[in-house]
Image (spheres, grey):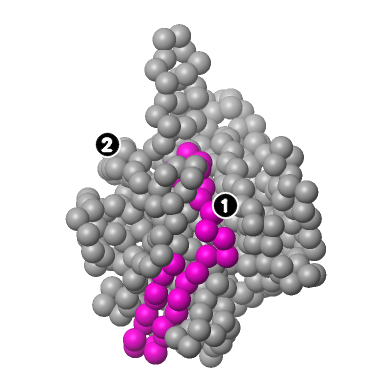
Amino acid sequence: MSRLMRSLLLLAGIVALLVAVVLSWPGAAPPPERFTLAALMGETAETESFMRALGPARFEFPRDHGPHPGFRNEWWYFTGNLVDETGSEWGFQLTFFRFELSARPPERDSRWATNEVWMAHFAITDAGGRRHEARERFGRPAPGGAGASTLPFAVWLDNWSARSLGEEFFPLALEASDPASGMHLDLILEAGRPPLLHGEDGLSQKGPEPGNASYYYTLTRMPAAGSLSLGTRSARVSGLAWLDREWGTSALGEGTAGWDWFGLTLSDGSDLMLYGLRRSGGGWQDESAGTLRRPDGSLLRLSRDDFQLTPGRRWRSPASGVSWPVDWRLEVPVAGLVLDVLPLLDDQEQNLAVRYWEGAVRLLDADGVDAGRGYMELVGYGD
């Protein structure tokens, strides 16, 4: 979720990597331009051999910041809302996806033997410069091109990385660059609020079947400072970052068309993670859910009946032709919360192995007053 079912993105990486290999064979057919939700998220014969999220987890930190072998997919999803010295706003995304091809490591004595494939996404939004760019990479852990470790913590793909600077988890150093586009990220993240567990003690149900779930927690309000570059524009920035951590095995339930996810840092000190799973026939699935953490640390678990998501203005991408609902009204009556979620920039579409919209947003309350910042993800439109 969005980090919700990032398995979609992980599976896209797997397919893209395998396609690249197959295309090297004589007579190979060209790959599809995009991978769709339906093509990527179905159950397979191998699914049953992996570990599943079947009950509440007993989280242990910093252990659970590291990898979880035995589950089919896992991700480390960093986003952040930053401001430069002139007051101009920026956003960033740096995500690492790990996917296991089989439940057991290969029984070959070779540095190249592995049962994992990795994918990473890197994006920067420069609201002042009215520009957004996103890039992706694929890799494998052998011999050291991608991976994750627990003590000290690190996750990396080539020279894109998130690493602890000492024996403790914090501070974290995030680094990524793409010289062709002028994209560069160099940030230090400090500890924010304690881990926020979603669902039932971290068990986040995504569908009606047992095990159709993931283990999911978030680190919010991490102070971030450093530098960002995009094209010819560079800036010293500071602000707040967000880390979503999820691992699991099962695919989305039958009839899921996509999802809309929101990770929001409110000005009153509250944190809100919320997602709506869209049915292919219209409406929201019962497993749509969220978590509101109030300024005093108290939690409000949100079920499908506790909130309303209403799409507003749409923006049509000139690159893909997809019409994205970039404005939303979000209401949580039980908490007296009414928010308008608006993009800092309409064009934050990610034309990667899977096409989705992911970007920095601002929040307005019912009176039109600034109420915070965050990130929004829209998946499954135009497939």
In the rendered image, the quadrant that contains the N terminus is: bottom left
Residue 347 magenta-highlighted:
yes
SS for callout 2: loop
x then y, percent, for residue 306: 30, 80
Residues at marks 2 and 1, CA–CA distance in whole angstroms? 28 Å
State the residue at coordinates (74%, 40%): 179
Q: Does residue 80 show up magenta in the picture? A: no
Up the image or down, 263 lies above or below 141; here it is below
Report the span colored magenta: 327-355
Q: Say which of 278 and 323 sits in front.
A: 323
Q: Nearer the viewer, residue 272 or 237?
A: 237
Q: Position of residue 199 (x, y in %)?
A: 37, 71
- Check residue 244 in the rendering and tell me which mark sits there, or answer none: none
Q: Is residue 78 above or below residue 268?
A: above
Q: What's the amino acid at mark 2?
A: Ala
Residue that label 1 marks: 95
Looking at the image, is mark 2 or mark 1 nearer the viewer? 1
Within 10 Å of the Cα at label 2, are there few (<14), some (14-19), or many (20+) other Cα atoms?
Answer: few
Task: Answer whether residue 104 is visible to the viewer in this image.
Answer: no
Position of 272 compared to 42: left or right? right
Q: Which mark, by number, is residue 45? A: 2
**What residue type is disc 1 on?**
Thr
207 in relation to 9, above or below: below
Q: Position of residue 147 (x, y in %)?
A: 60, 44
As drawn, the residue found furthest toward the top would be 26
